[in-house]
Amino acid sequence: MSAYHTSSPVLFIVFNRPDTTKLVFEKIREAKPPRLYIAADAARPGRPDERRLCDEARSIIHGVDWPCQVETLFQEDNLGCKYGVSTAITWFFCKEEEGIILEDDCLPSNDFFRFCDTLLIKYRYDTRISQIAGCNFQQGKRRGNKSYYFSSNIEVWGWASWKRVWNDYDPELKRFAEEEVREQLSKLFDEKLLVESFTQLFRDLKNNKIDTWDYQFKLINFFNNGLCIIPNANLITNIGFRSDATHTVSADDPYSNIPTEALSDPITHPIYFTPEKEADLFTLYKDFHINERKLKERKFKNLLKKFLKLS
C-alpha cells in the first residue's frame, strides 16, 4: 500500500539532535507536504559543540527531493524553549491558515497526516475545536467507539491547528490574573491537587521560572473552554527521552517510545461534543502524580493522628 501524501503544510521545529531530526524528517518526506517550514533555534552560549549539532540538524533541508515550497527560520541567537518554539509557530501561522506541527523528537505514523488532513478540513470553521493531537496516553483504553474523542487537555507531541486558535496564544499569559486563576481552575477540576498544580504552574510561568511554551497553550485552552481532538489510536512515538533532552530526560519514562497504532479507515466521527473527563483525569493524574501525592497525604495525616494521641 502506497504512503499517504498530505495536503497540509508542515512546520518542522528542530534544534540540536540531528539523529532524531533525520528520523522524523523521513516520515515527513514520506508524506510529501506541498509546503514545508523548517524552524531552528541557535546553539546556546558556552556550548561550542552544540553549534555543529545545530548545523547538522538544519542540513536536513537538503533532503527535500519532492515538489515542495520550503521556507526556513534559522535563529542566529538562542531563544530557548519558550520563545524558540512559540516564535516558530507564530511565524508559521503568519503564513498559513492551518497546518501540522512536528518537533524533532515526535515521530509520526503515516496515518497521522491523514488524520490531521481530514480533521483540519472538517473543523476548519468550528470554533469549539482548538487542536488535533496525534498522541494517545490511554494505555490501550478506547474512549467511545469512534476514531477519536474530545478532550479539554492540549497535547503537543505532533499536532495540528488553525491560525484562528493560535491568535489567542500569549507566552506571558498577560490577560490572566493570578488571584483569579485558582477560582477558575476549581470550576474545571474537583481534585484540589490538580488545582494546586496548575495554579503553581501558572505562577511559575508568570515569574519566568519555567522555560517552556506548551503549558501556556494548555492553560489558555482551559480558560477558553476549547476542545482538543485525541485519536483512539496512538499516532506519535516520542523518541526524545534521553539525557540530552530539555525536559524529557528519562529513557524509562512510561511515555517514552509508545508504539504507534493503525488508524481506522474510514475515520469515524463522534456526534457529541463533550470532553471525556475520565480520559483527561487519567492523563493528568499520571502527569502530576496525584495518586502518589494523595497516598503521602493520607500517611502524613495518620502519623499526625498517632502523634496527637500519644502527646
Image (tube, grey):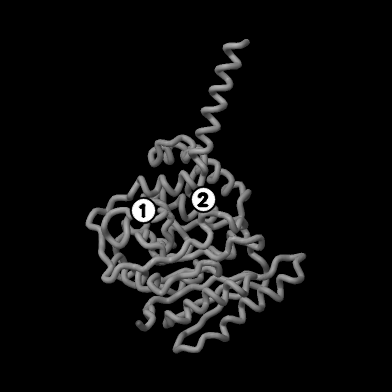
Q: Position of residue 262 (x, y in %)?
A: 36, 68
Q: Nearer the viewer, residue 177 or 227?
A: 227
Q: Is residue 98 left or right of residue 295?
A: left
Q: Quadrant of residue 2?
A: bottom left
Q: Position of residue 61 (x, y in %)?
A: 56, 82
Q: Which mark is residue 174?
A: 2
Mark 1 neighbour class, 10 Å CA radius: few under 14, some 14 to 19, many 20 or more: few
Is 5 above or below relative to 227?
A: below
Q: Quadrant of residue 305?
A: top right
In terms of secondary structure, where does tag 1 sit? loop
User: Which quarter of the image is occupied by the C terminus?
Assistant: top right
Q: Position of residue 40 (x, y in %)?
A: 60, 72
In terms of secondary structure, where does tag 2 sit? loop
Q: Quickly name the residue at label 1.
A: 141
**Amino acid type for the residue under numbered disc 1:** Lys
Q: How many marks?
A: 2
Q: Position of residue 193 (x, y in %)?
A: 49, 37
Q: Nearer the viewer, residue 34 or 77?
A: 34
Give the mark nearest the N terminus, 2 or 1: 1
- Residue displayed at 40% across by 53% down: 138
- Residue displayed at 43% across by 61% down: 135
Mark 2 neighbour class, 10 Å CA radius: few under 14, some 14 to 19, many 20 or more: few
